[in-house]
Image (spheres, rainbow, N blue to C red):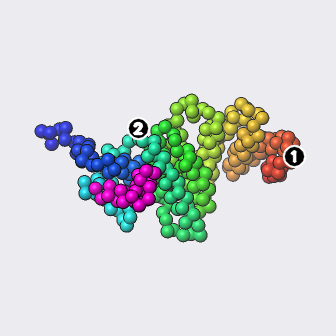
Amino acid sequence: DPTQAQHTLQWLFNRSARRLDATARQTLAAASLLARAPFPLEAMTAAMGETNAGQDAKKGAQDALKSLVQHGLLRRAEAGHWQFTHVLGYRFARDEDTSDPALRQRLGRWLHGHLMTALKASAGGETTLSLARPLQHAAALLRADHDHQLWRPLAEDVLYDAYDRLVELGRLELVKSALRAFADWMERFPLAKAAEPAWQRERSTMLNRRGNVLRAQGDLAGAMQAYRESLTVRQRLASADPSNAGWQRDLSVSQEKVGDVLSARGDLAGALQAYREGLSIAQRLASADPSNAGWQWDLSV
């Protein structure tokens, strides 16, 4: 309305939100930290916190959701699930820069269990729980984790457990989504934190796993780029601490992956060089600790 230019959609949303009680506002904030995809009542019950444990928390969440529906901010999407009525309402409610760490932790713990349940339910071809939706919520919650408090219970799940299970199921597009969520989470690290060796190692793992997916999809150029980025990180870590056997082994694994792509591209000389560099590391580790069956196994491979 040109005569009331201050009455924007954002203004309308804020006016509606001011009319909510504290519990409904907390529920709205929790809903906005997840994806715009439908979320279950259990998510909002978890968001209420330990002080509202048990039946009271569930009743409080139900009442809050009812209030949010009455205000036109949420709607029933399906049985036991709600979502924002409009994408702009979701955007106005969402705060990725100053969201409540305790609220994120409660949602992270709930989502950890929800994601693990969904992954287990998918065993044997069962599809009683969608895998895509929990991953969407995990990605959205990690994007809002501005101070990086959710390595545990959530980011680690996305990089390791979800990846392993989704690869077993052949759901490569979902694997890529999970890895993208983890990469986006790490992209927001302060430079000093991102440079820490432990986080550099996790980044190299993410890059290797991205390369695995790209290779499985036939994108050898993309796979090689990811593997070489990981290799560069692992070379730096191994050089910085030659006594760290784990980082030496990581380097050997990266050399093997580069060799695999070179072999698939027909560069047998380059592949042999990469394999020999990996072999040299495996020989050193096996010689340094003959009782370590893992090192001996690596050497035989």
Dividing the picture into quadrants, the one containing residue 55 is bottom left
Q: Position of residue 33 (x, y in %)?
A: 41, 48
Q: What type of secondary structure mainly makes up the magenta span? A: helix
Q: Please name whichever residue, 284 or 156, is drawn nearer the observer in this view of the structure.
A: 156
Q: Is residue 170 magenta?
A: no
Q: Earlier in the sequence, mark 2 or mark 1?
A: 2
Q: Please name whichever residue, 199 or 15, is drawn nearer the observer in this view of the structure.
A: 15
**Residue 80: in sight, yes or no?**
yes
- At horizontal 52% and vertical 62% (from top left) the residue drawn is 118
Q: Position of residue 239 (x, y in %)?
A: 73, 32
Q: Position of residue 85 (x, y in %)?
A: 30, 55
Q: Which residues are magenta?
A: 41-67
Q: Label 2, on which residue?
A: 98
Three-letter code, disc 1: Pro
Label 1 neighbourhood size at 10 Å, few (<14), some (14-19), many (20+)? few
Which residue lies most toward the left here? 3
Q: With respect to residue 81, does 16 lie above or below?
A: above
Q: How many marks?
A: 2
**Residue 274: in sight, yes or no?**
no
Give the left or right position of residue 31, taking residue 119 as reference: left
- At horizontal 32% and vertical 58% (from top left) the residue drawn is 63
